[in-house]
Amino acid sequence: MTVIAMTREMGSLGKEVARLAADRLGLTIVNHEMIGSADERANATTSAVARFLETGPGPEDKRNGGISHGGYLTPSEILELASRGQVLIRGWGAARLLREVPHILTVRVCAPLERRVEEMCRRLGVDAATAKREIERSDAEHAQAFLRFFSTDWRRPTNYDMVLNTNHLSVESCADILVDAARSVTLAETPESRRVLEDKLLEARIDERLHGATPFGRRASYVQSSVEGGRVRLYGAVSDTSTAREIEAMVRELPGVAALESQIARVPIYGN
């Protein structure tokens, strides 16, 4: 099952690259912006320019089943999409989130600022100063969010399997490269790569239960998890034994948990 996760700069023609590659591979495109938890969705906002650029599937999209406008997605929702396969997840966040899954291709599409400004002027019918301002705003928002979630620079090439520069490569050439890579035997799903994805999904579900709008509130602020082969390890600290037991019971009820090792320490925590 093919999965591509793509980050692209505004005005870099990444949308067109995604459409063409998805059409050739028979993938559904999901547009997304990543948020930390479902309760953040109500407070999330999308710029008017972003909404304009993402509205409405074109004729190319209808051939491969259409674009699914995912909007704001949590890490677990992105991982669930990836686990179903046959999808190209386009936006920011998914490429870095899925980078460690061996059978998933992670891509960044970029272009020089001047080319991006030209493209946005053409699309929006605005002057160069306005187009540049919107591009810089989009880049700044993505950089801040990427730093918040992943503590790294979203432009760093090592965050992706592949970086495509549409200043030198046409949309068709970029799509050709993506299709060839996606069909490579090195990106074939294996039991081991599937297990990596399932572990990341379980870890994300635990994290969202612990740190989202849950009954634990701030009581679970210092608790983290790691998952390997369905075996969950909880670590961190809480202020009382009953909280630790509630957290452990919640984790045991989640599907996919093969075993649980709790290393949660009971210590006084200021503010609890």
Image (tube, helix red, strand yellow):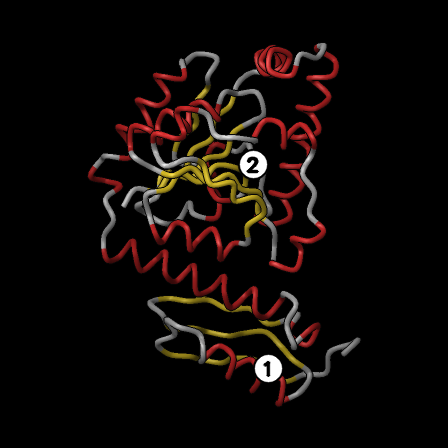
The residue at 56%/31% (across/down) is: 54
Q: Which residue is mark 2?
A: 154
Image location of residue 56, percent across then percent down:
52, 30
Instruction: Name the kind of residue labelled 1 in the image.
Output: Ala
Residue 140 is left or right of residue 82, and the answer is right
Specify the amino acid type for callout 2: Trp
Q: Residue at point 38% right, 39% down?
A: 28
From the viewer's side, name the closer residue of 161 and 208: 208
- Image position, residue 59 (x, y; %): 41, 24
Q: Are marks 2 and 1 in contact (CB under 8 Å)?
A: no
Q: Identify the disc placed on residue 150.
A: none
Q: Determine the residue located farthest toward the bottom in the rendered image.
A: 242
Residue appearing at x 53%, y 42% in the figure: 32
Q: Residues within 10 Å of mark 1 (few under 14, many from 20)?
A: some
| Image-quadrant location for residue 160 | top left
* Mark whose residue sits in front, 2 or 1: 2
In the displayed structure, does residue 171 sit left or right of residue 77? Answer: left
Where residue 190 appears, x then y in whole percent?
23, 52
Give the residue at mark 1: 265
Occupied quadrant, residue 117: top right
Task: Judge left or right: residue 20 versus residue 157.
Answer: left
